[in-house]
Amino acid sequence: GAGVSQSPSNKVTEKGKDVELRCDPISGHTALYWYRQSLGQGLEFLIYFQGNSAPDKSGLPSDRFSAERTGGSVSTLTIQRTQQEDSAVYLCASSLFLAIEQFFGPGTRLTVL
Amino acid sequence: RKEVEQDPGPFNVPEGATVAFNCTYSNSASQSFFWYRQDCRKEPKLLMSVYSSGNEDGRFTAQLNRASQYISLLIRDSKLSDSATYLCVVNRTSGTYKYIFGTGTRLKVLA
């Protein structure tokens, strides 16, 4: 079956522009997660959704970051007024329920010039 | 101190060797545990969940020690294709759910 998909796979933007990253989870998965990984670093948890609701937004690095999920499926992560330190790979994962195995998408590589 | 700690390695081992990785976690509210592998510039892929009784999948054995708060991964008969970074992942539920990833242990299997 189809796995988690993310788009775009690569995004190059200029400092100060807004970007929107998309994640399509595995069909039927109720939980969805966003992470980012900077070069040579570990995964940094950003936010998770249970259905359309995000109970914990404390992992978002700043108020320039926001995320939403609609219809219990697709999620978008929006970064406003991008900064160079936002450059990273943004990974999305989904799981059937919370607290069990997650499956990752291929990520979006964001480069802010 | 990080909530999930792993030896970064690298572990360089010959083909056919047995290698073991440990991972310690500090939050006793941790509930579920996993090992993922990550190849260079790729997304993490689930290797196995870790159960209290220990579990085995082919050449891979995972164990959990709740009293000492560590999990381990044993790889027997290492293959070249096992070369990757192995990530220890802990899920805790303290009001909300959070998956905490270790920074990974690099394994290089040498011919």
Image (spheres, rainbow, N blue to C red):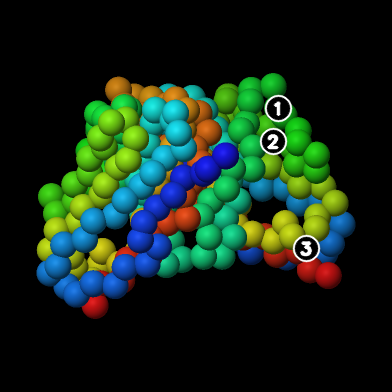
Where is residue A33? Give x, y as percent. Answer: 37, 40
A81 lies above or below B52: below
In space, the residues marked 2 and 3 are separated at their CA atoms by 20 Å
Going by the numbered disc 3, the residue's amino acid type is Leu
Q: Which sits earlier in the primary sequence, circle 1 or circle 2?
A: 1
Q: Is residue A79 above or below residue B29?
A: below
Separation of marks 1 and 2 at Cα, in angstroms = 6 Å
Query: Quick check: marks 2 and 3 in contact, CB under 8 Å?
Result: no
Task: Report which residue position mark 3 lands on.
Answer: B80
Work out which quarter of the rendered image holds the N terminus of chain A and state it.
top right
Disc 1 marks a residue whose amino acid type is Gly
Q: Which residue is mark 2?
A: B62
Identify residue type, mark 2.
Ala
The chain containing the residue under callout 2 comes to: B
Which residue corresponds to the image point at 46% horizontal and 37% vertical from the top-left? A26
Give the mark nearest the N terminus, 3 or 1.
1
Crowding at mark 2 (Cα within 10 Å: few <14, some 14-19, many 20+) = many
Quadrant position of residue B26? top left
Residues A5 and B19: in front is A5
Mark linked to residue B54: 1
Task: Specify the quadrant that holds the C terminus of chain A.
Answer: bottom left
In the figure, is residue B62 to the left or right of B78? left
